[in-house]
Amino acid sequence: MAGFRSLARQVRDSRSDLALRRYSLRKCLERFAPYGHRATWDHLCARHGIGPEDRAPDPARLMRALEELETARAVWLGYEAGFAERRRREKHDGLRRPGAFDDWHRRTWGGNGVARCDDPAVHPAAPLAEVLARLISALETEPGTGCPVCAQARIAWRQDLDSEPWSGPVCTGCGIVVPQPVLTRAALAKARRTRLDDLASVA
């Protein structure tokens, strides 16, 4: 099975058929897709003017999409290296049992779904690297009351998410499933009392 870097080389190979290069970019999302596979693809297509079903997209647009994905992946890998080093120190100091934060991180190892968007058509508009930098900053500071990506305070609890975790707080601004460790207990309690239907009826 080809890894991310090998697939990225295939995307860059100007001698290859455009359909194959596009396919290789889609395969990259099986290795790294911050919003989830479909939402990350929708994001890249929207930002770089690629038709989601276009089998022969403009090579320059394809390359810009790959570069955005690679830049974001570098940001996340840097964070994961720091996280792994922290866990090594904790284990050395006798802290073997991971906490809730580490449980969240385990589900997102590799960067897949780290800022999952349950609705593939609703996701942040900013570049992926910028979104991940905001998320990492929130993970490394005290919990807050709003979305770490768009600062929206209207967060609703969803019981029917399409993947693990099967329920959780969803930002009604940018669409991400907000990592619970970045929210205060009061913000989580407020989200649990708020349903998306409630917000829709107010709008």
Image (spheres, rainbow, N blue to C red):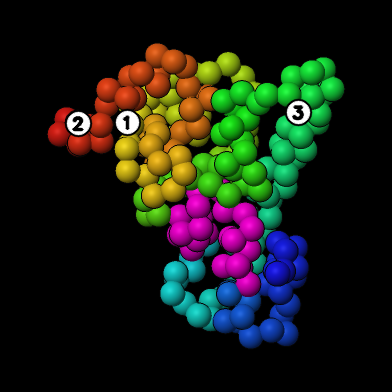
- On residue 198, the disc is 2
Q: What range of the chain is rendered magenta?
A: 24-47
Q: Report which residue position mark 3 lands on.
A: 87
> Which residue shows up at 71% across the image and 74% down it?
10
Does residue 34 show up magenta in the picture?
A: yes
Q: Which quadrant is the C terminus positioned in?
A: top left
User: Where residue 107 sits: x, y (%)?
Assistant: 57, 41
Q: CA distance from mark 3 to mark 1?
A: 31 Å
User: Where residue 188 sits: x, y (%)?
Assistant: 40, 21
Label 2's element?
helix
| Crowd tier of the residue under label 3, counting other residues whose Cα lies within 10 Å: few below 14, some 14–19, many 20 or above | some
Label 1's element?
strand
> Which residue shows up at 62% across the image and 38% down it?
106
Tag 2–tag 1 contact (CB < 8 Å): yes
Point out the residue furthest to the right here: 92
- On residue 156, the disc is 1
Q: CA distance from mark 2 to mark 3?
A: 40 Å
Q: Against 23, is 105 above or below? A: above
Q: Against 90, is 117 above or below? A: below
